[in-house]
Amino acid sequence: MKIFREKKRWIAILLTWLIVAGLLSGIAPHAKEVTSPNKNAGLPETDASIQAEKALKAYFPSSEGVPLFVVVHDKEGLKEQVIDQAITNIEKVMKDVNDDFTIVPLSKMPKQARASFFSKDQTTFFLPVLFPKGMENKVVKTTMDDLKKQVAKEQPANLETYFTGPAGIVADTYEMFSKADVVLILGTVGLIFILLIAIYRSPLLAFIPLIGAGIAYSVVDGLLGLMGKADWFAIDSQSLSIMMILLFAVITDYSLLLFSRFREELEKGLHVNEAMKNALNFVKEPIVFSGGTVFLSMLTLFFAVYESYRGFAPVFAVAVVLMIVAGLTLMPALFAIAGEKSFWPSNPRKRAEKRAGKENFWHKLGRFVTEKPWIAMAPILIILVIFSSMVRHVNYSFNLLDSFPKDMSSIQGYNVLNKAFSAGEIAPSTVIIKAKDELTTEQLSALVNELNDQKSVNKAEIQGNPYAKDHLNIAKINLVLNNNPYTEEAFDDIEMLREDSNQLLSASHINDAKMLIAGETAQNADIRAASHGDEIRIIILMTVLIMVMLGIQTRSLVAPIYMMATILLSYGAALGFSVFFFQDLLGYKGISYRIPLYTFVFLVALGVDYTIMLISRIREEQKNLPIKEAVREGVGKTGGVISSAGLILAATFAVLITQPVMELRAFGFAVAVGVLVDTFLVRPIAIPALIVILGKFSFWPKKLKHN
């Protein structure tokens, strides 16, 4: 009863969290259950490619649906009898499995008409199928499994059959992420536990942050599930995976900061309750400022045009708010309830007696940096500049398939298609002409000739009846580019065709008309433009916002400038080293176009955390000490906890390297490298050195004590 009376405040806080988590688990779906794909490929309704897609679906409704390509391959060459048997088998299975499938009837086509579905070397053909629009990913997966099983029963033994295209990739991706999410959470929890045991040698300390993170995660998951169910905003599976890692890592960071200060207060001989109250008062500012900075940084993503970026904002904003609240309530409650047992088998008071008069590694480093700041800082700045310069050599990939494992069935099928057909034939574009008057066959033929005269075009042709039903003023033309449709050269070609559209129409004697281009290449051209604009906008907004936050926290006009400069340099070095690692060492053609902005948002927002923690301690010491000694004490007293936290944060993001998607691996690698650079080079050496070099101007206009 005595223990309960002493700790009733902390027990009440813990019970509140448990009740909320329990209620949400009973009434809310898991966030994963309410995920949804981006609308319009993540682009605004007004973008040219989206307008073209809408026109294509409105006037040519047979084009609506999710495409599947059934690819049949025989390296020895396809024989006529086997071809007919395979086509008949595939078409029959498609009709049996789902009457709503739209199938290109190859079996009823004359040989000349179906020639475009066969490779020139007659080793491969493909049969296009459209899945009904709006099928859930899980249903696509189960349907695909059924199709593969049924087709395999009657398929000739010498044929290799693959299921690729968007529908095949959706099915494989759903299965891949279902398995990967389990590996991700087990890997994250296991790694944090091992690192905490290795660093602090305290079993209970290893469990407490994980228990707190688990409770907080269940609350966040429930809240996001309710919000997603109510259609407040769209939730993406990838954002949930990254959010889970961020939550466990950040709550562990806050736990270590709190734990370190709690131990200091106990070493002074204070009672557990008083020690925790004091510790909480000291860590309140850095947690609120660091968490607030991350929160506001995530909110800047609301200004993104591209939905893949903008969709991160609400998910992470909700998570970060709960992280801050957990850091200030749940984690202190767990540590206070455990009391001095948190440190078992060590004892804070005995530890203080043993360490009396001794300098630890971080105090020694602080002494070196404050006495020889230029020697300490110069090599680090040189290394950071060298790696930052490597960003110039980055190649961006806009093909999602480049991120997936090569052994995925849908990717194997895509590669077979890629070898058998030209790159442009796999993802052709569609030119749509909307005219005021009826379009004649002569005008359309003239436009086809004009398109075929363009250097960027491999083949433009009319397939079947080009006119929209009941709209003779609207027609379509199939377009195959020379360049790979997923490369930036092809995007440039699409943009050039758009710019020249009026000239092409005029030369074909088509007046008062508009030319639209639909297809993946056109969409990716618009995605590239949206992504580039978002990068500039978000980077500027976040930089200004973080500088304002640093200015408020440091009460200085100068400090935010050099602090932000080091954070940006750290980001540049991490991205540059990642480019060097993946492109030059591993031989990848490029990295996902989303990596730079993803990395910037997370690395800069998280990197500033440790700067805030260090500066908070320096300002605290500065009340009683000259600036050099305050810096030395700040580095010495925060070095152990921040380095431990940084190591754990880097390791948890490195868990993403185990994921099957190359985009996640590159992102996890870049953030891990950036956090390590910030934790072990920028924060304990570069920033303290700059403070000492700038002297009385380091926190100008605030007056400082000097040596």
Image (cartoon, helix red, strand yellow):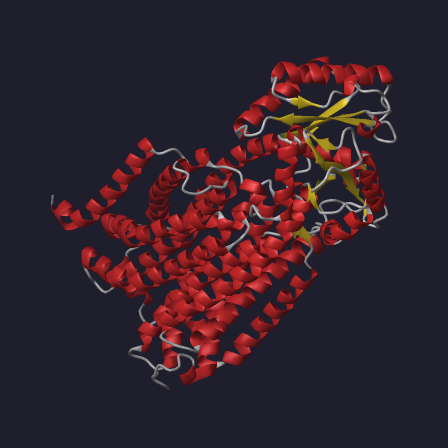
Query: Vertically, is 421 above or below 216?
Result: above
For the point 28% across and 59% down, the residue is: 262
**Viewer-nearest residue: 93 or 620:** 93
Residue 676 seen by the camera: no
Q: Quadrant of residue 406?
A: top right
Q: Residue furthest front?
A: 437
Expressed as whole percent of the image width and height from the top left, the position of residue 107 reads 78, 17
Name the image quarter holding the C terminus: bottom left
Q: Where is residue 270 in the image (x, y as percent from the top left)?
A: 20, 61
| Total tally of numbered discs in the picture | 0
Residue at horizontal 57 percent and vertical 76 percent from the top: 378
Towards the viewer: 528 or 511: 511
Question: From the viewer's perspective, is 237 left or right of 640?
Answer: right
- Whether residue 563 is situated above or below residue 436 in the rendered picture: below
391 lies above or below 312: below
Tell me if I can see residue 484 in this picture.
Answer: yes
- Residue nearest the observer in this picture, 254 or 78: 78
At a point 47% along the width and 82% down the height, the residue shown is 693
Direction from residue 53 to residue 493 in the image, left or right: right
Which quarter of the picture shows residue 518? top right
Name the image quarter holding the N terminus: top left
- 134, 597: nearer the viewer: 134
Q: In this view, does 481 lie to the left or right of 541?
A: right
What percent of the width, then of the height, locates residue 125?
Answer: 79, 26
